Amino acid sequence: MSSTSAAPLLECRGVTATFGSLVAVDHVGLSAHEGETIGIGGPNGAGKTTFLDLISGLLPLAEGEIFFEGKPVGGKPPHRICHLGIARTFQLNAGFEELTVLENILTATVFGRAHGASRGLFYSHAELERAEALLEEFDLAAKASVLVENVTVLDRKKLMIATALATKPRLLLLDEPVGGLTPPEIDEFIEVIGGLQARGLTIILIEHVMRFLTSVSTRAIIMHHGATIYDGPPKGIAHDGAVTEIYLGSSAEAMRQAEAQTPAPS
Ligand SMILES: Nc1ncnc2c1ncn2[C@@H]1O[C@H](COP(=O)(O)OP(=O)(O)OP(=O)(O)O)[C@@H](O)[C@H]1O
Ligand SMILES: [Mg+2]
């Protein structure tokens, strides 16, 4: 469990992104402490993905500062940020389609090396063993030699997380990890997140599927028009007037009923 008295692992202060005259992320502040799982929700276009793009260095900051382990990372290129210990997955399935599942993990392993990056896919025996262990962990071992273009959506989602882990992050950013999955697959993914938490990873994830977000997160944030409109316990979002009006609508009542039927954690 997180300790809010310790220095945050990640700290964002006044983080802002603009596209022309559009302020997509508007002075957002966020402190993520070691061991937290922060779930970000909010309507389409709220600025959730853009916020992760700023943290991972894919987009430049228009304003604000980002600190990781107390050091400024704003403005660093994505590969440097990855080498510092921040890895991410994407909203749309990303992967090297014409490489196999195992080759995708090995590519991430080589990319994730802060030192000794090579121009070819050269890896040590220990790195191969680690990649194979990741395949086992994510139930992908039987598909190791299948081309990524031929694997299911569920397996691609798992593979994105396995490749992120291959870069040895401390902070994992997940953009809609269960988007497009069926309810039983979402249940499976709740366990996948549990495994990541058991590894001690700090996680920031974006998700529209509120059942998933509230079950895996230790804290929830709701964004709207680039700003944070809620930051608190996941179970509180369905009771928040602004979140209900702007985002949840009639599903807030269903969430409250589901919560009432779920025993409180001991
Ligand atoms: N590359 C871009 N160029 C111009 N506008 C962009 C770009 N990327 C995002 N936007 C705009 O910035 C705003 C925030 O987009 P973003 O993708 O961050 O939203 P989101 O909260 O992730 O939404 P969704 O839930 O649909 O994924 C939107 O108005 C979007 O159209
Ligand atoms: Mg998005």
Image (cartoon, helix red, strand yellow):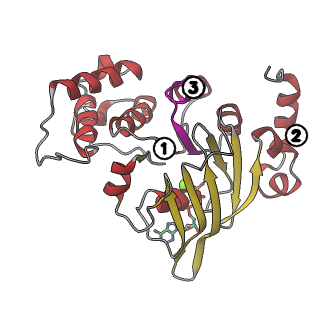
Determine whether label 2 and label 1 are within 8 Å by CB.
no
Residue sitting at the far bottom: 21
Q: Nearer the viewer, residue 110 or 105?
A: 110
According to the image, label 2 marks what residue? 253
Q: Residue at x 26, y 36 (%)?
A: 104
- CA–CA distance in space, label 2 to label 1: 33 Å
The kind of residue tagged 1 is Leu
Give, as a single range, the part of the protein colored magenta. Answer: 193-205
Expressed as whole percent of the image width and height from the top left, the position of residue 249 reads: 82, 50
- Asked whether 151 falls inside the magenta stretch, the response is no
Query: Mark 2 falls on what kind of element?
Result: helix
Circle 3 crowding by C-alpha within 10 Å: few under 14, some 14–19, many from 20: few
- Does residue 169 lie above or below 16 as drawn? above
**Disc 2 C-beta below 8 A from ligand 1:** no
- Quadrant location of residue 57? bottom left
Of labels 3 and 1, earlier in sequence is: 1
Apparent side of residue 166 relative to residue 32 in the rendered image (left or right) = left
Of labels 2 and 1, earlier in sequence is: 1
The kind of residue tagged 2 is Glu
- CA–CA distance in space, label 3 to label 1: 15 Å
Comparing labels 3 and 1, the label whose residue is closer to the camera: 1
Comparing labels 2 and 1, the label whose residue is closer to the camera: 1
- Does residue 240 lie above or below 25 as drawn? above
According to the image, label 3 marks what residue? 194
Q: Residue at x 46, y 30 (%)?
A: 154
The kind of residue tagged 3 is Gly
